[in-house]
Image (cartoon, grey):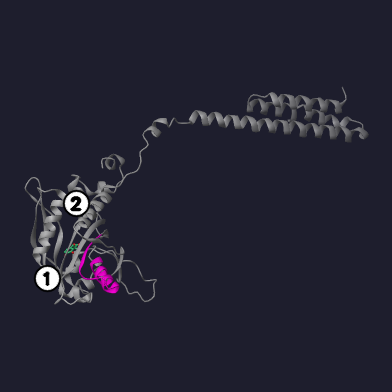
């Protein structure tokens, strides 16, 4: 038998060379077994140690060990390279050609509800109104009380209200904080703001915004929807001014051939109150919201003297107007984010 030390060095040389040439991970595994396995070349060499001269064992042992380290590191190095290559192949195979999707890339555009909201603002601004806003989380006082709906007023049940849980907040009673059920509290905020800033009345304002009701979504209702509130406070304002404003708005927004009408109704914050209808091309009437002359109690809550100031208010659904204008059958289509629907606007 040849010199075991030399044997070990030869094995290392062979191992390093074959590892570098290996084409597959399987080949590498085989090389590992052939050289490093129990019955592999180094393994067998190790078993001859027993028979070696005691003074030579140390040297042979070191040679075997060095050879093992060299082979192991060569195999490991090659494995890293082969694995990276395999990953690259998988990535290439699984890659998708996105050229087509890129070609269809679209720039974003305004949501139909926002579009309607903006058009409404434009029409009213064109008629000399300012645009006001208020918070979506409101207090009971702004949403109901100041609007002539004291606690336990039966008409409160007209608004299915979502209350904010304030049990963790010191000093805030149960049912005092809510998600506004209509944009009417912005009437109150607008009158109080004008008083605070010493800027009015006269007030000619619209207040578009998001409102909330405890309601199940269906084709004609959404639990989260939008309204636009109108408020006019001036000297000598009458019901005729209200009817004229609604009519002018109808023509400006829907077109000269459209007309409006008011029907008697009831709201606690207006007296008298009316329902606003808009004529449909087929001759039928469509209800779009409520309106009326601002109730003296509402004016008083805002520090205005009903003997000096009078006014009217109105409020209607923005989503419903978008639905009519674009002939959309189901309000839920506005919120389900189906691109095929949204792209039409
Ligand atoms: N706030 C009412 C609602 O949401 C609509 C409304 C009716 C607003 C009469 C008004 C009004 O300003 O005068 O049902």
Q: Residue at x 21, y 49 (%)?
A: 322
**Front position in the image: 124 or 91:** 124
**Residue placed at 29% from the left, 39% from the top?**
340
Please give the range of residues in magenta: 186-207
Q: Which residue is mark 1?
A: 236
Mark 2 or 1 closer to N-term?
Answer: 1
Residue 261 placement: quadrant: bottom left
Q: Quadrant of the N terminus?
A: top right
For marks 2 and 1, give the CA distance. Answer: 31 Å
User: Foreground residue, 22 or 305?
Assistant: 305
Q: Position of residue 257 (x, y in %)?
A: 9, 47
- Judged from the image, the quadrant occupied by ligand 1 is bottom left
Quick one: label 1, few (<14), some, or many (20+) residues within 10 Å? few
Secondary structure at numbered mark 1: loop
Measured as percent of width and height from the top left, residue 105 is found at 37, 36
Compared with 243, 101 (above or below) is above
Q: Which residue is mark 2?
A: 321
- The quarter of the picture where residue 210 lies is bottom left
In this rendering, the label closer to the viewer, 2 or 1: 1
Q: Is residue 321 covered in magenta?
A: no
Residue positioned 66% across, 25% down in the render: 27
Q: Position of residue 26 (x, y in %)?
A: 63, 26
Measured from the top left, where is residue 290 in percent x and y? 15, 61
Q: Residues within 10 Å of mark 2 (few under 14, many from 20)?
A: many
In the foreground, 113 or 71:
113
């Amino acid at each position: 038998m040849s010199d075991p030390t030399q044997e070990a060095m030869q094995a290392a040389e062979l191992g390093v060379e074959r590892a570098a040439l290996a084409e597959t991970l399987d080949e590498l595994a085989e090389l590992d077994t052939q050289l490093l396995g129990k019955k592999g070349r180094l393994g067998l060499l190790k078993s001859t140690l027993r028979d070696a001269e005691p003074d030579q064992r140390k040297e042979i042992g070191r040679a075997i060990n060095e050879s093992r380290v060299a082979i192991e590191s060569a195999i490991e190095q090659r494995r890293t390279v082969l694995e990276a290559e395999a990953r690259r192949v998988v990535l290439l195979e699984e890659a998708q050609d996105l050229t087509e999707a890129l070609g269809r890339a679209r720039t974003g555009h305004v949501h139909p509800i926002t579009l309607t909201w903006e058009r409404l603002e434009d029409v009213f601004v064109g008629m000399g109104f300012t645009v006001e806003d208020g918070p979506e989380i409101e207090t009971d006082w702004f949403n109901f009380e100041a609007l002539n709906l004291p606690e336990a007023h039966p008409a409160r049940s007209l608004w299915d209200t979502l209350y904010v849980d304030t049990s963790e907040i010191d000093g805030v009673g149960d049912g005092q904080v809510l998600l506004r059920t209509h944009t009417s509290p912005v009437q109150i905020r607008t009158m109080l703001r004008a008083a605070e800033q010493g800027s009015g009345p006269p007030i000619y304002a619209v207040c578009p915004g998001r409102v909330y009701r405890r309601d199940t979504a269906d084709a004609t209702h959404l639990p989260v929807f939008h309204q636009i509130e109108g408020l006019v406070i001036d000297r000598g304002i009458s019901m005729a001014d209200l009817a004229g404003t609604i009519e002018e708005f109808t023509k400006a927004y829907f077109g000269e051939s459209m007309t409006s009408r008011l029907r008697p109704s009831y709201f606690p914050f207006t007296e008298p109150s009316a329902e606003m209808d808009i004529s449909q091309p087929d001759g039928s009437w469509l209800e779009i919201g409520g309106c009326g002359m601002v109730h003296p109690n509402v004016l008083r809550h805002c520090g205005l003297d009903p003997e000096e100031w009078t006014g009217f208010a109105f409020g209607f659904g923005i989503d419903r107007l978008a639905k009519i204008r674009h002939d959309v059958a189901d309000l839920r289509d506005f919120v389900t984010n189906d691109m095929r629907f949204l792209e039409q606007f």
